[in-house]
Amino acid sequence: MGARPMQNQSTPIAQKHARTLRRGMTDSERKLWFGLRGEQLGVKFRRQHPLGNYIADFACLSPKLIVELDGAQHQTQRAYDAERDAFFRHQGFDVLRFASNDPFNQLDGVLQAILDRLDELALHAPIPTFPQRGKEQYHPQEHLS
């Protein structure tokens, strides 16, 4: 049997670290969070959201999208970022990355890029059909006999 995704589970260490990161957000993260919070783009985002051993800067669980802000340290940790992205994608998430100064230089452009990706993901997401409770289907042919 193949490996199943973790269903957004996180390790206790990642959970603790995420709480610390939420308290100490960078100015860039705060600026982007101001545009994402409160379902301003029509979906709920979580900040510093732990997934497995990793912490996503911003995560939308439906549709599954992770938004990362890359500071200067990411130039030297490309292999680690690629590993994180692979893990997130294995969990079913799409990943968008922006430079950490983008929220200051072009916040509207960043938010529009996120909104565009959310729209793309929504188009490809399966829409479950549920029977409406208490609603009977009326079949006129059954009542003619």
Image (cartoon, rainbow, N blue to C red):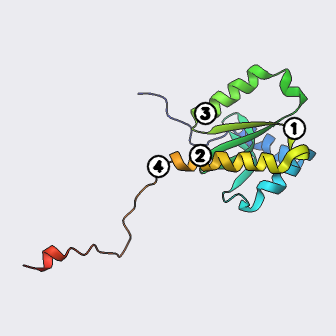
Disc 4 crowd, CA 10 A, few/some/many (<14, 14-19, 20+)? few
Label 3 or label 1, whichever comes before in sequence order = 3
As drawn, the label of residue 89 is 3
As drawn, the label of residue 126 is 4
x then y, percent, for residue 94? 63, 38
Callout 1–callout 4 Cβ contact below 8 Å: no
Q: Is residue 139 above or below residue 47?
A: below
Residue 111 seen in the current view:
yes
**3D distance between C-alphas at marks 1 and 4:** 33 Å
x then y, percent, for residue 43? 66, 57
**3D distance between C-alphas at marks 3 and 1:** 22 Å
Position of residue 76 in the picture relative to residue 127 (left or right): right
**3D distance between C-alphas at marks 2 and 3:** 16 Å
Residue designated by label 1 = 100
Which residue: 73% across, 45% down? Answer: 113
Which residue: 27% across, 72% down? Answer: 137
Helix, strand or loop at mark 4: loop
**3D distance between C-alphas at marks 4 and 3:** 17 Å
Helix, strand or loop at mark 2: helix
Q: Quadrant of residue 10?
A: top right
